Image (cartoon, rainbow, N blue to C red):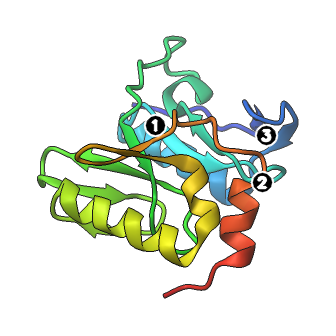
Amino acid sequence: MEINIIKSMEIKCDDCGKVFNLTAEQEKNVREFAEKGKPFMALRCPLCHSMLMLYPLALTGITNELPKVEDTRLFYCPTACCIGYVEYDEESNVYNCAECGSIWKNKDEVFNSISKIILKYPHRKTVYKKVKNGWKSIPIGTAPDSYFSEVQNNEKIE
């Protein structure tokens, strides 16, 4: 598979709507992902710091079809300073956060981490709802505007 050399890749952020160019290193990563046939990759917007999904095969001109990406995020991550999300990994049978690398063996461990982070940092309660058997996240993407800055600026790495 031959990858077209791309001089500049412009990306428009889904959240802030601003356009930015990928760095040379990011372009290299896009080409490497495309060469390996990987349909998508994540990138943080340098302007608003939101997570973006990039489609290397489309960006390099290999295909015009965008892959369907299933949203597997279950919880806002309950790790101090982390603005990532907890997902369930069926292959390894664990819950994890790709942003900070935290791993939980089962849902009860996730619930325990949520309880602890709320006790330590009450602003975290804005993204969780107490339910009969544990916790539930508010819908992903609906966190209050101040949530991410509070997590990053008012918490300490444990």
Closest to the observer: 120 or 4?
120
Above or below, 121 against 91 in this view is below
Disc 1 is placed on an element classified as helix
Occupied quadrant, residue 143? top right
Amino acid type, mark 2:
Ser
Crowding at mark 2 (Cα within 10 Å: few <14, some 14-19, many 20+): few
* Residue occupying image coordinates x 69% and y 47%: 50
Amino acid type, mark 3:
Ser
Residue position marked by numbered label 3 in the rendering:
8
Circle nearer the viewer, 3 or 2:
2
Q: Earlier in the sequence, mark 3 or mark 1?
A: 3
Task: Calculate the distance from the C-alpha at mark 2 to the C-alpha at mark 1.
Answer: 36 Å
Crowding at mark 1 (Cα within 10 Å: few <14, some 14-19, many 20+): many
Relative horizontal placement of residue 126, taking residue 146 as reference (left or right): left
Q: For the view shown, which residue lies furthest in the right direction? A: 18
Closest to the observer: 93 or 131?
131
Task: Calculate the distance from the C-alpha at mark 3 to the C-alpha at mark 2.
Answer: 33 Å
Instruction: State the image coordinates of residue 63 (x, y, percent, origin top left).
Output: 49, 16
Amino acid type, mark 1:
Ala
Crowding at mark 3 (Cα within 10 Å: few <14, some 14-19, many 20+): few
Circle nearer the viewer, 2 or 1:
2
Task: Calculate the distance from the C-alpha at mark 3 to the C-alpha at mark 1.
Answer: 16 Å
Q: For the view shown, which residue lies furthest in the top direction? A: 65
Q: Earlier in the sequence, mark 3 or mark 2?
A: 3
Residue position marked by numbered label 2 in the rendering:
146
User: In which quadrant of the rendered image does the N terminus lie?
Assistant: top left
Q: Which mark is residue 34?
A: 1
